[in-house]
Amino acid sequence: MMSICGDDGLRELSSPGKSGSIFYLSHDDRFVIKTLRGSELKVLLKMLPSYYDHVKMYDNTLITKFFGLHEIALRGGKKVRFIVMGNMFKTELRIHRRYDLKGSYHGRITNKDDIDEGTTLKDLDLAYEFHMDKSLREALFK
């Protein structure tokens, strides 16, 4: 609660996506808050039971952890929906490359002229071979 509601408030991040969502970061970088459209809310609510079962079964999952899905009504009746997620990038490790992976090929490559050190890359930009211990590989696929 203090991460989000403390004296330092939230920092607004520029949205790199096309969705028009607004992203906020808690002052301690532990949480990301993303505004949602009604259609996104419906999808999340539909997948919530399966998501919950997965996270409960695999506590070290690489899937983003959702902590709350909320809706507030502003004066005038407009509703704002938002989700509170764990920040995957809150780590002591140096992150040298970031990817926004959606599991799609459609429009999922970055224009090579637009790439610099801070660019978030897409699915088709990921051109690596990963070598890992067989037991880790099996656990990842499981």
Image (cartoon, rainbow, N blue to C red):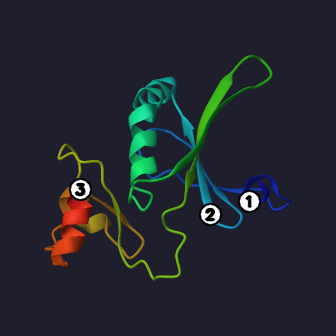
The residue that appears at 39% across and 58% down in the rendered structure is 61
> SS class of the residue under badge 2?
loop
Q: Which amino acid does label 2 sit on?
A: Arg
Neighbor class of circle 1 (other Cα within 10 Å; few <14, some 14-19, many 20+) is some
Q: Does 66 sit above or below residue 132?
A: above
At numbered mark 1, what does the secondary structure look like: helix, strand or loop? Answer: helix
**Considering the image in quadrants, where does the C terminus appear?**
bottom left
Residue extending farthest to the right is 7
Residue 107 to residue 48: above or below = below
Asked if residue 126 can be seen in this view, the reply is no
Query: Do residues under tags 1 and 2 come within 8 Å of each other at their CB atoms?
Result: yes
Left or right placement of residue 44 versus residue 31 in this view:
left
Q: Where is residue 113 in the image (x, y as percent from the top left)?
A: 26, 67
Label 3 packing within 10 angstroms: few (<14), some (14-19), many (20+): few
Q: Is mark 3 on a helix, strand or loop?
A: loop
**Residue at 46 percent of width and 41 percent of height:** 52
Which residue bears the numbered disc 2?
Answer: 30
**What residue did someone put label 3 on?**
142
Viewer-side residue, 78 vs 46: 46
Place of residue 114 in the rendered image (x, y in percent of width and height, measured from the top left): 31, 65
The reply to whether dot 2 and dot 3 touch (C-beta < 8 Å) is: no
Distance from Cα at disc 3 to Cα at disc 1: 33 Å
The amino acid marked with disc number 3 is: Lys
Where is residue 103? Give x, y as percent. 24, 48
Task: Farthest residue to the front: give it.
Answer: 57
Q: Residue at x 53, y 81 (%)?
A: 92
Q: Residues within 10 Å of mark 2 (few under 14, many from 20)?
A: some
Q: Which mark is residue 3?
A: 1
Residue toward you, 77 or 92: 92
Label 1 amino acid? Ser
